[in-house]
Image (cartoon, helix red, strand yellow):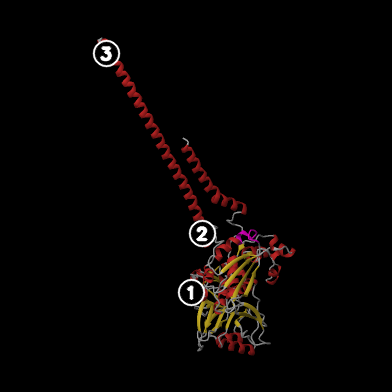
Amino acid sequence: MKDKDMENVDLEKTEETEETEKKTETVGDDAGEKVSKSDRMRRLRMGGYSILLVMFVVAAAIIVNLIVGAIPKKYTQFELTGFGLYEVSDTSKELLADLDRDITVSCMATEDGCDPQIAAFLDRYTAYSDRIKVVFVYPNANPDFVNSHNVESMNSIVVQSWEQDPETGDRTEFRSRTIDYYDIYEFSQDVMNEYYSNYNYMIYGVAIDDVYQRDVFDADNELTSAIDYVTTDNLPVAYMLTGHGEIDLSEVFTSFIDSNNIALDELGLLASDIPDDAGVILINNPSLDLTEDELSKLTAYIDNGGKILLVTDVTSYSTEKLPNLTLLAKHCGLDAVDGVVLESDGDRYNNNRYNLIETLEPMDITSAIYTNPAGVLSYLPRSHAIVADEEYDGAMTVEPIIKTSESAYIIGKNEEDRERAEDDRTGEFYLGAISRDNGTGSAFVWFSNSFINAEESYAYVRDANLNVYASSITTICEKPTIVSIAGTMTNANAQLLMSDTVSTALTAVIQYAIPIAVLLLGVVIFLIRKFR
């Protein structure tokens, strides 16, 4: 009996144990199921957060792209060419900042067909003024516009200014200028010199375009000159005196004068009086003297606020040969010393003592083009001397533009280079000077060497001589120089521009492909986590 009772007790314990284990297994299964569901919910939430984060990043990228696109190109496009290909000059920025008229810049091409270099520069240039609007005009579809503005080439630019009727509000064209495509792309002085020094090209008439590639991108100068022309009220006239064997100005200077919106005309005083609109009279290396009547007209012109720019040369000028011209200078407080100036200072001449290399004097004419005129060299070989007239008692004051050292001396016109002799006139001489009356505004500029505006001087001192002469014209005309002689000497072929195909491909990748790829990656990660 006891054994059976023990067996029954063991059986009951076994059954209780099995039931307990079953309950434990049931509880474990329920807990595991609850844990699995919790883990899945957590992963689902994480995946949702990932998608939201990806969508936020894509939205942020789009918003940033729109904001950047609205920022002016002058802040978002950088000059990477290394030589200022797309740089907008300080002079241009100042002009654009002060615009008081609305300007329309029309590029003669479709927007997609516009020269990419011109289009890129227009973006940067026009960003400096909200008064400029750029439009694209296809010539074949707008023959009336083309004909009325004398457009000859595709990708030419027409600059127009407008004035508005205060009563009706109607706008009419105030003034316009057309910039030909072949004035935007030009040849540098170095290329021009090489071309004209090759007699085969000259003899056989081979055009420069057939031999050389244009290496100057001059859009900044051309646009600024055009905008100044269509907005300014100051358009002076420079008259070239004729009838005395004067030398014509080179194309460099006629182009410079035109680019700075100074009209150029000829003046023969024997047959006419000085026009009222004469901003300056240019007398360029005459070999014959003025008549008494011409001298009278020119002195009266000076006394009434006129401006004269005189260039003489030792080969064609002397006080004895041209006494009336000398009297005109003396009327303005300047005189001349016949002979050739030599330098004793070895740092101021090259090889021969009469090959003068002098620095510029700091004054308004030179400071208008150079921040440090004293560091700029001018080359004036075989010059005669200019001095202040010791007997002058008028209202005009003299100021040097270029002068020698105090140890310079003068030898005879036909003498060769030699050491200074005891009886040689020694001292500081002017090679360029200005005399002016601040009361009347009259000015008389005199350079004693025709090399001051000779293109050959470029080979010796680059554009220093040319710029000094050019700045003299604009300064006494009270017309700030907006275009320099040198222009923008940059290699037009060294472009950092992408083709339309590459540009479109990169735009698609950055704006669409990358954001879509990020979004798809987020979706894939979400799905993997959901069904893991």
- Tell me, yes or no, whether the highlighted magenta stretch contains residue 112: yes
Between discs 1 and 2, the one toward the N terminus = 2
Magenta span dominant secondary structure: loop
Q: Nearer the viewer, mark 3 or mark 2?
A: 3
Q: Nearer the viewer, mark 3 or mark 1?
A: 3
Q: Which residue is mark 2?
A: 76
- Tell me, yes or no, whether the highlighted magenta stretch contains residue 155: no
Q: Where residue 29 sits in the image (x, y, percent)?
A: 38, 29
Amino acid identity at mark 2: Thr
In the image, residue 125 sits, relative to residue 13, either above or below, namely: below
Q: Is residue 190 visible?
A: yes
Frontmost residue, 98 versus 290: 98
Give the label on residue 156, or none: none
Over which residues does the magenta segment extend?
110-118
Amino acid identity at mark 1: Pro
Q: Where residue 149 sits in the image (x, y, percent)?
A: 67, 71
